[in-house]
Image (tube, rainbow, N blue to C red):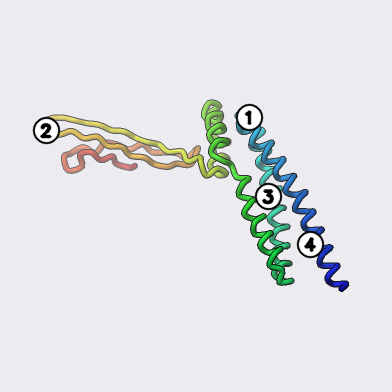
Amino acid sequence: MKRKITTLFLIALIATSFVFAKADTEALFKEFRTAALSQDVSLSMEKYEKLSQAIEKEAETLQETLEKAIEENNGRLYYQTLDSFRALDNYSIQREESTALEEAIVSEQNTEAAKWLYENSAYYNPTLTINAESSGDGYAFSIVSSKSCTPGEEVTLPTYIEGTSYAGQLAGF
């Protein structure tokens, strides 16, 4: 009986910590989202750092709870905890925030912020695209080549390869 009461108390305590941690994480996400949509890059980066720390703490607590559920063979707590883990994905940078930040970063030409967005957003994937066309006596070609690149990465532009056997190809890209 005493063990059952202790277990119930522990579950109630863990559930309470989830509620407070989730509320804190949700508030931080809203602050980040507001900053991102208003294109305040510095504040967005600051808020996202705090949000990431809150998510990390919440994940650690969830991991402990998951282990406790396994130890006690508590299926209900186990599946509730897995659902809470899945819910953490909701706090990632979404397309709308990523696009707003990208616009601000490009207008500011802020390479450091571009690197940060590249590392933290699944929706930011800068790509360099080269279009080349040539025509002459008896030939014409058009080529489009793209390369994904990390912001700040030095990119060597391709050179046109002369000669009929390489017509339509760019070297070094």
- 152 up-or-down from 88: above or below: above
Q: Name the residue under label 3.
A: 55
The residue depicted at 69 percent of the width and 36 percent of the height is 31
Q: Hey, what amino acid is under mark 1?
A: Asp
Whichever of callouts 1 and 2 sits on the residue coming sooner in the sequence is 1
Quarter of the image for the C terminus: give it. top left
Q: Where is residue 7 in the image (x, y as percent from the top left)?
A: 81, 67
Q: For mark 2, does the 10 Å Cα neighbourhood hold few (<14), some (14 to 19), or many (20 or more) residues?
A: few
Q: Hey, what amino acid is under mark 4?
A: Ile
> Which mark, by number, is residue 40?
1
**Res. 85 image quadrant:** bottom right
The nearer-to-camera label among 2 and 3 is: 3
Q: Hey, what amino acid is under mark 2?
A: Gly
The nearer-to-camera label among 1 and 2 is: 1
Q: Position of residue 167 (x, y in %)?
A: 20, 39
Q: Distance between the residues labelled 2 and 3?
A: 62 Å
> Which mark, by number, is residue 85?
none
The nearer-to-camera label among 2 and 4 is: 4
Q: Mark 2 points at which residue?
A: 138
Q: Where is residue 35 in the image (x, y as percent from the top left)?
A: 65, 32
Which one is in front, 130 or 98?
A: 98
Tell me whether circle 4 and circle 3 mark residues in contact (CB < 8 Å).
no
Relative side of 68 to 133, left or right? right
Relative side of 24 to 144, left or right? right
> Which mark, by number, is residue 11?
4
Whichever of callouts 4 and 1 sits on the residue coming sooner in the sequence is 4
